[in-house]
Each structure stands twice: as structure tokens, then as C-alpha cells.
Image (cartoon, grey):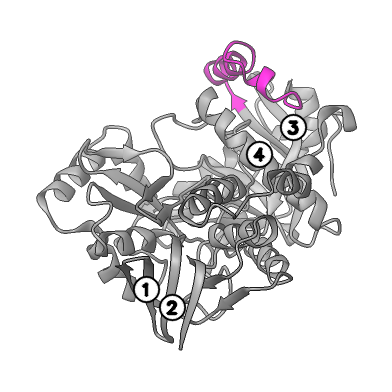
Amino acid sequence: MSREYDLIIVGGGISGASLLYTAAKFTDIEDVALVEKESELAAVNSHHTNNSQTLHFGDIETNYSLEKAEEVKEGAELLAGYLENADPDRDLHSKRSKMVLAVGDREVAELESRYHDEGFGDLFPKLRAIGREEIADLEPGVVEGRDPGTDLLALQTPDGYVVDYGATATSFVRAAQEEEGVDVYLGTAVTGIEERGDGFTVRTGRGRFAADATVVAAGSHSLQLAKEMGYGEDLSLLPVAGSFFLADDLLNGKVYTLQMKRLPFAAVHGDADVHDPSTTRFGPTAKVVPALERGRLSTVSDFFDVFGLNAESMLSYANVLADPILLPYVLRNVVYDLPVVGKRAFLPHVQKVVPTVEVEDIERATGYGGIRPQIVDTEARELDMGEATITGDGIVFNITPSPGASTCLKNAMRDVETVLDVLDDDYAFDEAGFRAATIDNFPRPAERDVGAPTSE
């Protein structure tokens, strides 16, 4: 098999699917292909059991600076607008109240300052500061059984989008396939990418494909492919496996706890599964593992391809893991996976959200949790708190840990503009049409009662 395309996208998760949708529906690029190694779309980290199902706006993520929240907010609103427009029956997502909870004098003061002094209340007009009585109205389980002398404060918003990112990726691809010139190859592993004079040859198990431009959106494997081509030599990955504990129906919406600012991992939170509101998930935990995919031993060697086994990587890992905040956190998370003692050790995190939970009420979820690749800068020898984009001449490699799924459409818009710079000047991006299908459908405060909880 040998085909020629204007653009080839490697990876059929939420990032690659959103780019396919954006390029196919809102540009006049004629021939586009998506190549995915799995037999179905979004089968790895975008699958709904393998992530926190959260659409991150930056409003309740207390490790975000105001600047990062501003950047993430637009991306989240693009995706939320798409869901409002394309998923009126809530097959891909649900909409619930969400809040970040402060417990005790120190946390309450920190959250008050964040809302009033640091500008988060201004940036997010739907966000409200609420006390114990309103918290109890929205989430009785959060207040029941808690010491009445303990100060409580929450920042609450109705914009609690709980998303099945795998189903959303499939929705993107189906919409793209309505256009001519769009091909999707499943069960087609990419074995390498070669530069040629006027573009790229993408080698796969089903033959070679030619492309004028290529975007690799393959999660952790993006850096592996980049390094094979000589890109990203100053980067490595710290793969972190997330797990969850399950309980019965305990919460109406999503309840986050305050996050330590120097940790790149999501704060422990509780919320109902996107497709099963009778099940409450608590987590995620965060365990460092030497693999690029959860439960796949074949990706251990892939990890070492990325790691490099060189002095720079070794010293970077030693420096990162010696951090006095990160190291104890990593060690504690190893304990959470142990039989019997694991859930006892994790129980205080659950009880911070729902105080009446006992150890017999929670069970470690099996078959839940994926790999979140944290990016390591081997020159600075530190974690790079965010996403990484490596851009060559006509090729882009995206490594997108959280909040990459939340900002997938914003990233797609950026990548489309990069691709159009490579292709003929006759190609154009219909940004107005793109926004009409996405962010223009996001409900603004004037369109509904900001303070009203939702339970769709």
C-alpha cells in the first residue's frame, strides 16, 4: 500500500482526532489521513477508564497560576462549546456542579486569597465562594459527619463537564469522515518516519505513506518517534500511572481538594463516573512506572528508548526525584497500590472529601487508570510542568499530559496553522466557522443562573 497525502496525523486519541476534525472540517486541505496503531480509536489514555474525565478550565485547579488558567480556559471553552453543540443528549459528557474544597483555617485563607486577591474570581465569572451551608446544600456528604468547628470554604461553579474523551475522539473522527479526502487507518502501527526532499515517508505495518506535512499526536510515543528522527534530545519522560478507588454514590458533582503547587499531578478528588452516576471515583493516585502504556510490558523497552540511558537523563531523574516534596509523594503513592494496606493508607484522602467513608466502603478499581507522561527537561534537570511541542520543518510532535485533552481543540487550531504554513498558500483556515461550531456554543453567565447547580 502506498498513498500520498497533504497531511498525515499519527495517533487516534483525543489529540489526533481533534486535529483531524479541525483540518477536515475547517480547512481546504484536500487529502488527510489519520493512522492509529490500535484496532479502535482512543483505546489508550483517552479511553474513559484511563483518565480523570475532567474538562480542566483552570478555575478549581489550585496548582495553576492565573497565567496558566487564562491559557487553559479558552481551550476548555472550545471543547465545552463543541460538546454543547454536538452532544445535546449527553452521550459524550455530563454536566454537574464542581468545586474545590478548603478544610481548616490555613486552606480557607489560601482559597479566599486565590479567589479575591489573585484574580480567579474575575477570570471565572461563574465561580462562587460558598460556605458550609451552601456546600451542604450541593454536597451533603461533604459536610455530614465533619467537625462543626472546622472552617470550610469552596469555590463552586456549574461548569463541571465530565467527559468521555474516547467517545469524543470518535465523534471528531466521524465528523471529519463526512468530508471528502479523509482516510482513517486503524490497526496500523507506525514503525518510523523519514524526511524526504518534499515531505515525509511514514512507514507502517501496512506499507508506506507519503505526506507533505506530518503531526505526531501519539502521547508518550511522540517523543520516541521524535528522538528516532533526531528531535527532542533535551527531553525525557517521567511516566506516571494513575489509579482510582471506587465507592457507591456519595457525591452529586465533582469535589476537588487543594493541590500542592509544586506537584504536576492532579489533586485527589471525588466524582461520579461519566457513564455511571451511581459509582463515585476517588483519585487519582500517581505511581512512577518504567513504561509508556499501562499494563503493556512491550512498552518498557519503548520507555528506555525515550529515557536514553545517558548521564543527562540519569542526573535529571535523580534531581527530580530527590525533591523534598516530590519524593515522599512518590513513595506514598507506591503504598496505595498494595493489597489491604493500600486502601487504608488512601482512606484519609477520601475522608477529606466525604468524612463518613470507612475503609470497607472503598475498593481499588481494576482496569482503571492510564499513563500520564510528565516531561523532563534534561538540560535544566527538572520537570517541565506542561505540554511539549517539538516543531521541525513540516513536522510537529505533541506530548500532551494533562490538561492536553482539555485543550485539544486549541492545540489543533495551533497545529493547523503550522501545517498551513508548510502547504501551498492557497489553503486557508476557516476560524470563524471553527469558532461557530465550538466556543460560540459555550454558555456565558448571562445565559443562565450562575449560582444554580446543575444535574443534567
Label 1 to label 4: alpha-carbon separation: 47 Å
Give the residue drawn at x 58%, y 52%.
52
First in sequence: mark 3 vs mark 4: 3
Q: Which residue is mark 4?
A: 255
Give the crowd class for mark 2: few <14, some 14-19, many >=20 residues within 10 Å: some
First in sequence: mark 1 vs mark 4: 1
Give the crowd class for mark 4: few <14, some 14-19, many >=20 residues within 10 Å: many
Q: Is residue 11 visible?
A: no
First in sequence: mark 3 vs mark 2: 3
Q: Which residue is mark 1?
A: 201
Identify whether 425 is placed above or below 190.
Answer: above
Residue 125 lies in the magenta-colored region? yes
Label for residue 209? 2
Q: Is residue 287 visible?
A: yes
Label 3 to label 1: alpha-carbon separation: 48 Å
Q: Please state the horizontal and vertical placement of residue 444, each as a whole percent of the image.
A: 81, 32
Proximity of marks 3 and 2: CB atoms separated by less than 8 Å: no
Label 2 to label 1: alpha-carbon separation: 6 Å
Label 4 to label 2: alpha-carbon separation: 46 Å
Residue 21 lies in the magenta-colored region? no
Q: Please state the horizontal and vertical placement of residue 438, each as a whole percent of the image.
A: 74, 47
First in sequence: mark 4 vs mark 2: 2
